[in-house]
Image (cartoon, rainbow, N blue to C red):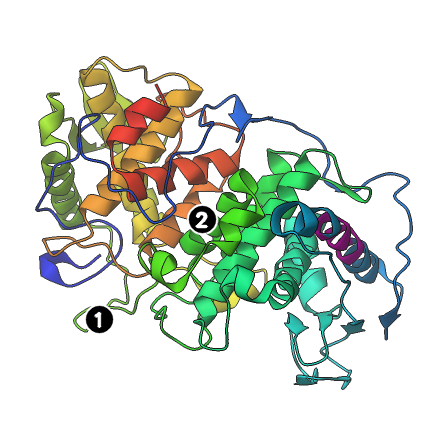
Amino acid sequence: MIPGGGRRALVALLAVAAVAVSGCNDKGGANGDPAKDTGAGSVSGLPVTHFESGLKPGAPSPDLNVRNADGGEDDKLATAAIADVQAYWAEMLPANFGQQFEPVKSLLSYDAQTDTEETGCGSVKKLVNAFYCPVDDSVAWDRGVLLPMLRQRFGPMSVVVVLAHEFGHAVQYRLGDKAGVSKSTPTVVKEQQADCFAGGYFRWVAEDKSKFYRVSTSEGLNQVMASMFLIRDQAGTSAADKGAHGTAFDRTYAFQAGFEKGPKECAGMTAENVKARLTERPFDKGDKGKGDAKFTAQAVELLKKSLDEAFQRAGATAPEITDGGSCQTTPPASYCPGDNTVSIDMAKLAQLAQPIDREAEMKGQDPGGMGDFAAFSEVASRYALGIQKGVGASIDNANAGLRTACLVGAWAAFTNRPGDLRLSAGDLDEAIADLLQPESLVSADVNGKRPDSGFDRVEALRRGYLEGSSVCSKAYA
């Protein structure tokens, strides 16, 4: 965030419509109708489950010919993923679009460090990637660098989501006009559809319809969401860029839309309705900090002012924010009901607010901090608890945590306009990065307890941002 009207991390914009715990007009994004289920006891209507996600014990060996495969663990995961996704689409294409499914014509495994295999789209030399090539109707993956990195950091289902996404492009190619995709369709729209198709497939797996894989709706989906965060576009990328794939906020939105509503929802994503809700944008010209402000006493003052203005119509006494304070129950930020204060640890929050080291992150190393929006949103979440207590809402159960994340999202949308602090490119991704951490406060109740499902935590923030604060009290009562 940049104080004084420039753009910086998340905190910001004071001005315009106030956010209330209830009663604000819904913002409503494109395709932003409320989910059918939003409670903390389930994930989009499915039970919250805990078990090891990955290949099922005794899963069959896929009967697929993969060129250049080495038979290692990552090839086994990828080949099973392709077989499974093809089984999914063999059901979905006839049921949803009235056409028969045809498998892709060829599959290629390669090692980006050593191989020089050719596809219809060119050589794979030094290509750390997975991709669908429409020229020869093929799917290829790098078993040397990309897949092992994902598997080691996020578990086997991260490999599966990457292949499910790439196969989503093969489905676009097969659907043609039914998916509304042509040569002129912006890349980011094609990517949103592919993420959405992957979400629909994962719903099928979560419903235990897969012969190969199983995924829990808690830790399993959390790993999938975390891997999608990793492969987000760099902050400051424009959605109009030729190669834009989307922010983590945009990509998880599309994945969740597919998971909740299925492939017809995905095929309905067009340049017009996707553009209306995309958060990907370049940095402001005056933003010398590239979206990250230092977490200082002055920044906390601006944060307090922003929160006070955002929640002024709630009819509750605004909490004070103090360094230290009377309680330290959920450091580095705690809501203290006894005296209606938010107690913060400036030093720890300043550390959290350090910019993400993208290069280190991609190498699997400590990325440093999570960005200023992560720190600001943790404080905002404790402040939001004070507002909720002031209007008589619960602050000590799972729905209180989701309602809190939702209100943080609504406040983020409030700051998305010129003012003393302004939402910047990359800020919402910093909030998602924090939400997916096991110790995050953004979706935690007053005691620091948060819902097990990262899917629900991210969705709550997204709904507040796109639909407005009134959905927070309605959906998470």
Task: Report x, y in % for residue 399.
Answer: 40, 21
**As rendered, which of 337 and 81 lies closer to the eye?**
81
| Amino acid at circle 2 | Tyr
**As rendered, which of 188 and 348 lies closer to the eye?**
188
Task: Report x, y in % for residue 67.
Answer: 85, 74
Q: Is residue 357 left or right of residue 139?
A: left
The residue sitting at 79% across, 71% down in the picture is: 105
Q: Is residue 50 left or right of residue 377?
A: right
Task: Report x, y in % for residue 47.
Answer: 60, 24
Q: Give the image quarter of residue 468.
A: top left
Residues rendered magenta in the picture: 81-89
Residue indicated by mark 1: 288
Q: Residues within 10 Å of mark 2 (few under 14, many from 20)?
A: many
First along the sequence among labels 1 and 2: 2
Number of the front mark, 1 or 2: 2
Q: Which mark is residue 253?
A: 2
Q: Secondary structure at mark 2?
A: helix
- Quadrant position of the N terminus in the picture: bottom left
Q: Is residue 264 left or right of residue 309?
A: right
The residue sitting at 64% across, 59% down in the picture is: 162
Residue 420 lies, with reference to residue 28, above or below; the image says below
